[in-house]
Image (tube, coloured by chain):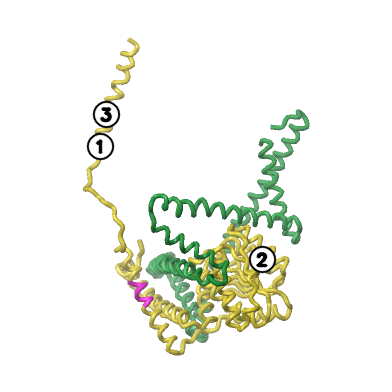
Amino acid sequence: MKKLCWKILLLPLFIYFIFFSYSLASETETSAEIISATQWFNPQRINVFIILIVFFAFVLYFIQKAKKGGSLFVRRIAGLDAIEDAVGRATEMGKPILYISGIEDMDNLQTVASMIILGNVAEMVAAYDVPLLVPVCLPFVVTVAEEAVKQGYAKAGRPEAYNRDNVRYLTSEQFAYAAGVNGIMLREKPAANFMFGSFYAESLLMAETGLSTGAIQVAGTANIHQLPFFVVACDFTLIGEELFAASAYLSREPKLLGSLKASDLAKFLIMVMLVLGVLLETFGITKFTSWFFVQ
Amino acid sequence: MGTEEIIWNGVAAFLVLCIYTFLYKDTPLYKFAEHLVVGVSAGYFAVILYYNGFVPKLITPLKQGQWVYIIPAILGMMMWTRFSKKWSWLSRFSLAFYIGSGTGFAIPLYMQNYVLRQFSSSMLPMGFSSWALFCNILIIIGVLSALVYFFFSKEHTGIFGGTAKIGIWTLMIGFGAGFGLTVMGRISLLAERVVFLREYLLELKYYLYLLFKYGLPL
């Protein structure tokens, strides 16, 4: 009797669920069979592709021009003069130079630029016999930094002055690395601190400590949110693209100079197109702008 | 808060205070905390790398018969040749592969995110009929003059130099706003640490009260 009562009670619920699920199923339509597949090309990003092709054409043209010995003028950047002054000051004071390459790995373009600058700084430093300390955040960067410093010393004709222990791995944890660098700044008291690369929240911690030790500080990053801290706490700051320009300017490598020139031409074209786009938008023509929109 | 929490939070509070001694000078307490955090994090990173990188990205695929993963394994092992003066040149292949592929991936993404998105967002209609349209004029002047500042093929002299000066002023205004915003964020971090220390002291006081009055650790 009890079982029967339960069945009577549960039957309407059961019927309701059957109908409810049926009504849900009836609301949706069965689509055609879809099979996902890997695609080599995303047609929605055709604009990125075309612009890259044009940009690389500029780069190749200017590289060829630089290789042939064509004159490629690049204006002086104030921060770069300061690097030489800082190296000279460290020599006079007999104190080391600290080079910090940021906290990103070698797949970051800023770290790549930083390593090129490191090679040039090492070349300058080698001539004066000043210790160059390079505390590094990531293991892979250590190997590249070692190569850069080693080549810098070799270029200066003093490979024997290269001390492998001065390129040190600290830790890969952001704030632990900042604490370690701060410790080096306070104990080794470098005469000059160079900070080039990709920095995040640790930027002010390091720049402020460097300022308190009285070192000349030259910094450069393309991370917009960290630039204000470098501007405030450092003597010279390379803003954004100046970091990439610095690596080209110091090395005078045709490949880097070529890409710098290409980026200048690209900027000019961007400005022209921007003015054109603004005028068209003002007159209600939006097709031009929408072509540049990236989904 | 139990005994275990009191002890571990006590360690955390002690280390926070050790780091704050840096505001006075480079004290032995700061040195202790610094070396501890650097050492612990380096060791921790090695373990993380093993479990998040080595095992799922090499061991597991190889066990599943995906032999293509042998290639990155060989490239990784070539990095170890740096310990040998004779064979260290082999590590350059791994470095070249990593930097090349990293840069290759990065360039289209940079073009997409840092150039095209901002470029299309800057193409704004302008005019004087509304405040929004007038602001667009300011945005466009700011963008164009900032771009002029980043021209390296020409000296910043004459009209070009004047435009570049407007560009650097625009950048500095932006940096000022960014600085203020981040400082506010840092102040909130400081407030969070102060609250942590205050709450810990209150909990510790209560814990000691119970311990001495009733002799019962929680």
Label the green chain with its letter. Answer: B
- Disc 1 to disc 2, how far (Cα)? 64 Å
Tag 3: amino acid = Ile
Q: Nearer the viewer, residue B117 or A198?
A: A198
Q: Which residue is mark 2?
A: A208
Q: Which residue is mark 3?
A: A18
Q: Residue at x 48, y 85 (%)?
A: B154
Establish whether labels 1 and 2 are both on one chain.
yes
When the figure is inspected, residue B158 is found, relative to residue A149, above or below; the finding is below
The image shows residue B87 at horizontal and vertical percentages of 53, 70
The image shows residue B70 at horizontal and vertical percentages of 42, 59
Q: Nearer the viewer, residue A115 or A153?
A: A153
Q: Earlier in the sequence, mark 3 or mark 1?
A: 3
Q: Residue at x 64, y 80 (%)?
A: A126
Q: Which residues are magenta?
A: A50-56
Query: Most prominent secondary structure in the magenta stretch?
Result: helix
The image shows residue A203 at horizontal and vertical percentages of 60, 64
Provide the chain ID for the residue under circle 2.
A
Q: Does residue B83 appear left or right of residue B211 in this picture?
A: left
The image shows residue A188 at horizontal and vertical percentages of 72, 68
Label the yellow chain with its letter. Answer: A
Q: Which residue is mark 1?
A: A25
**Which quadrant holds the C terminus of chain A?**
bottom left
Tag 2: amino acid = Glu
When the figure is inspected, residue B208 is found, relative to residue A234, above or below; the finding is above
